[in-house]
Image (tube, rainbow, N blue to C red):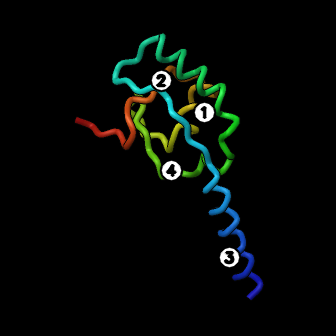
């Protein structure tokens, strides 16, 4: 009984935490330019502090980037740009599709 209560409480805490995760608008383009990349990087620097740790595990609003990888939101994309030194920008909302 205690274990069930603990698991339920943990699940509730995680779901409440992820509901406060923040996504923010980034410029979108199918073509990566230095100007768009710098604008994206500035917005990421400004807004990445708003991202909750749990938002990195929240894949409910996918976006497609110019590297043809689907990210779980702007927080995920900004993490790659700022902390993995990736040169990518947002192409569109939704998953990437291969044509």
Image height of 90 relative to 71, above or below: above
Residue at 56% across / 41% down in the picture? 23
Q: Quadrant of residue 96?
A: top left
Label located before the other in sequence (3 or 4): 3
Q: x%, y% of residue 56? A: 60, 46
As measured in the structure, the alpha-carbon distance from the residue carrying label 3 to the one carrying label 2 is 39 Å
Label located before the other in sequence (1 or 3): 3
Q: Residue furthest front?
A: 25
Residue at 72% across / 73% down in the picture? 9
Quadrant (top left, top right, bottom left, bottom right) of the C terminus:
top left
As measured in the structure, the alpha-carbon distance from the residue carrying label 2 to the one carrying label 1 is 11 Å
Q: x%, y% of residue 38? A: 54, 15
Q: Which residue is mark 1?
A: 79
Image height of 11 relative to 34, above or below: below
Residue 59: assigned label: 4
Tag 4 and tag 2, C-beta contact below 8 Å = no
Residue at 65% across / 41% down in the picture? 51
Label located before the other in sequence (3 or 2): 3
Residue 88: assigned label: 2
As measured in the structure, the alpha-carbon distance from the residue carrying label 1 to the one carrying label 3 is 30 Å
Tag 1 and tag 4, C-beta contact below 8 Å = no
Q: Would residue 1 be found to the left or right of residue 57 on screen? A: right
Tag 2 and tag 1, C-beta contact below 8 Å = no
Q: x%, y% of residue 74? A: 53, 37
**Which type of secondary structure does the marked residue at label 1 adopt?**
helix
Mark 2 nearby-residue class (10 Å; few <14, some 14–19, many ≥20): many
As measured in the structure, the alpha-carbon distance from the residue carrying label 1 to the one carrying label 4 is 14 Å
Residue 8: assigned label: 3
Mark 1 nearby-residue class (10 Å; few <14, some 14–19, many ≥20): some
Q: How many labels, in total?
A: 4
As measured in the structure, the alpha-carbon distance from the residue carrying label 4 to the one carrying label 2 is 19 Å
């Amino acid at each position: 009984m205690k274990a069930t209560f603990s698991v339920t409480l943990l699940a509730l805490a995680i779901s409440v935490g992820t509901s406060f995760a923040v996504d923010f608008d980034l410029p979108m383009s199918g073509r990566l330019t230095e100007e768009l990349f710098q604008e994206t990087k500035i917005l990421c620097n400004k807004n990445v502090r708003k991202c909750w740790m749990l938002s990195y595990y929240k894949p409910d609003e996918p976006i497609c980037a110019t590297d043809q990888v689907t990210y779980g939101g702007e927080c995920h994309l900004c993490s790659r740009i700022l902390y993995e030194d990736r040169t990518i920008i947002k192409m569109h909302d939704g998953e990437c599709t291969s044509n």
